[in-house]
Image (cartoon, grey):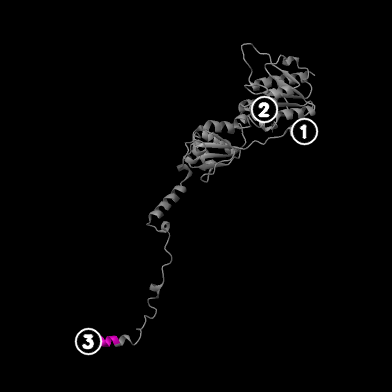
Amino acid sequence: MAGNSSRKGAIRASKKGPSAGTGGKNKKRLSGKGPTPKAEDRPYHAAAKRKKAAEKKATRTPAARSTSPRATTMSRATPTRAPRGDRPRGEIVAGRNAVLEALREAVPATELLVARSIDVDDRVAESLKLALHLGLPIREAHRAEVEGISPNSQGIVLAIKPYQYSSFEEIMQRAKYPALVVALDGVTDPRNLGAIVRSAAAFGAAGVLMTERRAAAMTASAWKASAGAAARMPIAQVTNLARTIDAAKKEGLFVVGLDGESEDMISSMKVAAEPIMVVVGSEGKGLARLTREKCDLVISIPISASTESLNASVATSIALFHIDQARRKG
C-alpha cells in the first residue's frame, strides 16, 4: 500500500542521522535571560510599589515634616532600637515625672529607654533634651518590653549606675584636722540618707558611713535628696558599725551619739573642736544598744514637749551646725 511504503521510507530516512542545523541562526533564543529579579525590582509587583512609596516618604522636604518642638526633640534624639529582652542594668527609675526629676538632678545613669511611638509630652521632650545634653544613650524599644521592665513606666525608663562606695580608710585619709565623720545606725529612708549627705557636705564632713544591711542605700531617691552632694561626698558601707566605731577611736575620733532620750543636751558638748564621729540612730528605734554603749557621749537636742521627736536628717543637721559654730568660735 502506498501508505505503508511511505511509512517505511520515513523510517529509513530517520536512520540516516540528524538533520542539518540552523547554522547558528537561533543562537540568541538559546541564551538565558539571567536570574529572576527581586520582587521589589519588578515594576508591577506590590513589593516594588511599597519600596517606591517608602523612598518617596524618606525624601520628603523638611517643610513637609512636623516642625513642632516635641517632634524636633524626638528626631534629634535619634534613639536606637533595643534588642528584645535586653533589660537595662542597675536600678530602674520609671515614669515621666520620676525620670525627669532624676535627669534634672543629673543622677548618674547608663541609658534612657523610650517606648516606640510614645506620646511626646512636655516631660518626655525635656527628658530627651536633658539626656542629649548629658550625653546619655537613648534607646527605643517596643512598648510591651518597656512595660515588662516596669508596668507603670508610662513609656519611659531610666537606668541608674550602681553607686561607687568608698571605705572608712579612704574617708580618714581624706579628712582634715579636726576630722568630722557622720555614721548612720540603721537609717532606712533613702530621702533621709540623701538629706544627711547634703548636710554633711554643707558643714565640712569628711564622709558618711552606713551599714550594708537593714539600711538605705544610695539609690536614685537618695541621690536626688542629696541635691548633687553625693557626687562630692565619700560614702562608705561597713559590715559592722561597732567595729568601725572602735577603728574610729583608734584614729583619735571622739564618738558622739544622737538620742532623744539622753539627759545630756547638745549645748553641754565640750568636744566640738576635737575630731568627732557623729552617730545617728534609725528613724524608729534610734541607736542600737551596742552602738550606744560604744559611744563616748550620747546627747539629745531639746525640743518642745508637744513634738515627739525630730526627723533623723533634721537632728543630724542641727548637730552638725552646732559643731560647725563651736569650731568657728574656737
Residue 28 percent across, percent down from the top left = 40, 73
Extreme residue in the top direction: 305
Residue 88 percent across, percent down from the top left = 56, 41
Whether tag 2 and tag 3 are in contact, CB under 8 A, the answer is no
Residue assigned mark 2? 197
Residue assigned mark 3? 4
Q: In this view, does 147 lie to the left or right of 313?
A: left
Residue 310 percent across, percent down from the top left = 64, 18
The secondary structure that most of the magenta stretch takes on is helix
Which residue type carries mark 3?
Asn
Q: What residue sits 42% from the left and 56% below the top?
A: 40
Q: What stretch is highlighted in magenta?
A: 4-11
Q: Is residue 57 visible?
A: yes
Point out which mark residue 72 bears.
Answer: none
Q: Distance between the residues labelled 2 and 3?
A: 119 Å
Element marked by disc 3 = helix
Q: Can residue 116 be seen in this view?
A: no
Residue 205 percent across, percent down from the top left = 73, 27
9 falls in the magenta region? yes
Q: In this view, does 187 lie above or below 8?
A: above
Q: Using the image as rendered, state which of residue 235 and residue 116 is in the foreground.
A: 235
Residue assigned mark 1? 173
Q: What residue sits 71% from the left and 24% below the top?
A: 291
Of mark 1 and mark 2, the one earlier in the sequence is 1
Quadrant containing the C terminus in the rendered view: top right
Whether tag 1 and tag 2 are in contact, CB under 8 A, the answer is no
Which residue type carries mark 2?
Val
Element marked by disc 1 = helix
Q: Is residue 288 above or below residue 103?
A: above
Q: Is residue 47 left or right of residue 12?
A: right
